[in-house]
Amino acid sequence: MIKRKIVSFIVIIFALLLQTTIFRKLALSDVVPNLLLVATVTYAYLRGRTSGLLIGFLCGLLLDNAYGSVVGLYAFMLMTIGFVIGFCQKIYFRNGLVLPLILIAGSDFIYGIYYYITEFLMRGKLHFAFYFIHRILPEVVYTTLVGIVLYRLIVVFEVMTTKKKEEEV
């Protein structure tokens, strides 16, 4: 149990560091993949609603600390996404890759729409088509492609920590 939490925390910190340093330099069309969203979706899909909620809150607070103009906005967005994705834990397939990628892409799309509403629409900027084509769509594609690697990495860590837990019992 403690090992799972420590490994999860290390993965989240690793994702934050990658997102804020290396992928900042590898930005395509000024878009960076949202690795903390991928971590939130993956853990919610693997562990359920409660873990998705808590990990989403932690990842959101880290994003608020790194980028946020309002404390709690990212935390609320990722917490909500993690909770909703946690319902899909009941249809978890260990070897399947299609559903997690659909969940990552759909979550990033919802995240982009919610971000547009809270950061642009509330300020009277109504150019949704421009924002959709230049921000949301490239970020969904980039996050989904990078999410394949991060998802597989998290699944490997989960299998390693749960196998050792089952062997101890």
Image (spheres, rainbow, N blue to C red):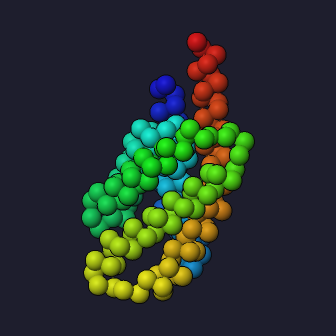
Above or below, comparing residue 109 to residue 133 in the picture? above
Taking depth in this image into account, of 113 and 74 the one nearest to the observer is: 113
Quadrant for the C terminus, please: top right
Taking depth in this image into account, of 44 and 17 the one nearest to the observer is: 44
Residue 89's x, y, as percent? 55, 40
Left or right position of 41 against 70: right
Residue 64's x, y, as percent? 34, 59
Q: Is residue 33 visible in the rendered structure shown here?
A: yes
Q: Specify the quadrant of the image occupied by residue 167.
A: top right
Q: Specify the quadrant of the image occupied by residue 120.
A: bottom left
Q: Specify the quadrant of the image occupied by residue 29.
A: bottom right
Identified at 51% across, 74% down, the residue is: 136
Identified at 51% across, 67% down, the residue is: 109
Identified at 53% across, 82% down, the residue is: 134
How many numbered marks have been drawn onto this rendered protein structure? 0
Residue 100's x, y, as percent? 62, 51
Above or below, comparing residue 148 to residue 153 in the picture? below
Identified at 49% across, 49% down, the residue is: 85
Q: Is residue 15 visible in the rendered structure shown here?
A: no
Residue 128's x, y, as percent? 43, 83
Left or right position of 70 against 44: left
Q: Which residue is situated farthest in the right direction here?
A: 95
